[in-house]
Amino acid sequence: MSGSRPSIFGDNIDLTGFTPKSGPEPNAVPPEKSRRIAEEGGFPSRAPVLRPPQSSPKTGRTVLLNARITQRAHDRFHEIVAAEQARFEVGEITHRVTLGEIVERALQALEREMKGQGA
């Protein structure tokens, strides 16, 4: 063995044996027959189950927020989430706090501050 593979980019590749299909395969099983055999074998077809988007419908947080922030702000948000997670684990709070909740609480604090300053 030479220990090297032939190049797939070489000019000597013969593709004459590959042609596009001109229609359905001659031995293809009709869908009705396939469905009947599956049901007889105990594999009935099921309607697809529609699932909600990967978000938290319980909390109503379904909109993605994308913003550029400083590394320090990013780290601080995640430190707060970690601290709240620790509080949850020892039973001080009854739910897991997410980054979305921390952002909402930060907005509420900012709004309270702005009202107090008359802005």
Image: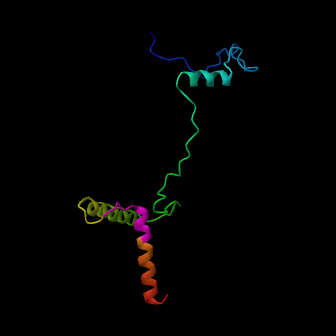
Question: Who is closer to the viewer here, 75 or 88?
Answer: 88
User: For the image shown, how many numbered marks are present on the structure?
Assistant: 0
Magenta segment range?
Answer: 94-104
**Residue 90: image location, x then y, percent:** 23, 61
- Extreme residue in the top direction: 1
Q: Residue at x 46, y 84 (%)?
A: 114
Question: Who is closer to the viewer here, 41 or 82?
Answer: 41
**Residue 36: image location, x then y, percent:** 62, 23
**Residue 73: image location, x then y, percent:** 39, 66
Dividing the picture into quarters, in which one does residue 103 lie?
bottom left
- In the picture, measured across the screen, residue 48 lies left or right of residue 19, that is left
Q: Residue at x 31, y 63 (%)?
A: 94
Dividing the picture into quarters, in which one does residue 70 lie?
bottom left
**Residue 49: image location, x then y, percent:** 55, 43
Q: Is residue 29 magenta?
A: no
The chosen color scheme is: rainbow
- Extreme residue in the left direction: 90
- In the picture, measured across the screen, residue 21 lies left or right of residue 55, that is right
